[in-house]
């Protein structure tokens, strides 16, 4: 299964013990198969501008049927911060 690391041909080292939770999560998501990404995963990575060429087509597929998708735990703010 394809990951962002494979698409980018750039393997990040593991986040260190002092890394923020966001850095740890982004590092994990770079290794997650793209086919398993959730709306929340897309929100995080696109918000950090990581893997945009690989993730943008997935995001569009999520947005076409529901322009304001909801993540399972938090509201996804695709167009503005609230």
Image (spheres, helix red, strand yellow):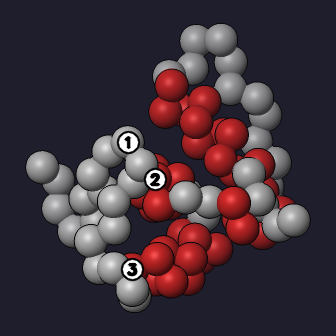
In this picture, is 46 found above or below 21?
Answer: below
- Give the mark, 2 or 3, whose residue is nearer the N terminus: 2
Binning the other alpha carbons within 10 Å of mark 3 as few (below 14), some (14 to 19) or many (20 upward) gives some
**In x, y percent, where is residue 79?**
22, 68
Circle on res. 73:
1
Q: Residue at x 72, y 67 (%)?
A: 35
What kind of element bears circle 1?
loop
Q: Residue at x 66, y 39 (%)?
A: 27
Are discs 1 and 2 less than 8 Å apart at CB?
yes
In this picture, is 27 found above or below 16?
Answer: below
**In x, y percent, where is residue 70?**
33, 59
Between marks 2 and 3, how big is the CA–CA gap? Answer: 13 Å
For disc 3, the marked residue is: 63
Binning the other alpha carbons within 10 Å of mark 2 as few (below 14), some (14 to 19) or many (20 upward) gives some
**In x, y percent, where is residue 28?**
68, 40
- Give the mark, 1 or 2, whose residue is nearer the N terminus: 2
- Can residue 22 be seen in this snapshot? yes
Q: Is residue 33 left or right of residue 23?
A: right
For disc 2, the marked residue is: 40
Q: Is residue 74 left or right of residue 13?
A: left
Picture quadrant where residue 13 is located = top right
Q: Residue at x 57, y 20 (%)?
A: 19
């Amino acid at each position: 299964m394809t990951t962002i690391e494979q698409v980018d041909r750039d393997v990040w080292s593991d986040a260190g013990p002092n890394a923020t939770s966001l850095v740890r999560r982004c590092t994990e998501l770079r290794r997650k198969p793209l086919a398993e990404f959730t709306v929340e995963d897309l929100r995080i990575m696109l918000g950090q501008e990581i893997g945009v060429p690989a993730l943008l087509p997935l995001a569009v597929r999520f947005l076409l049927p529901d322009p304001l998708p909801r993540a399972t735990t938090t509201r996804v703010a695709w167009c503005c911060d609230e």
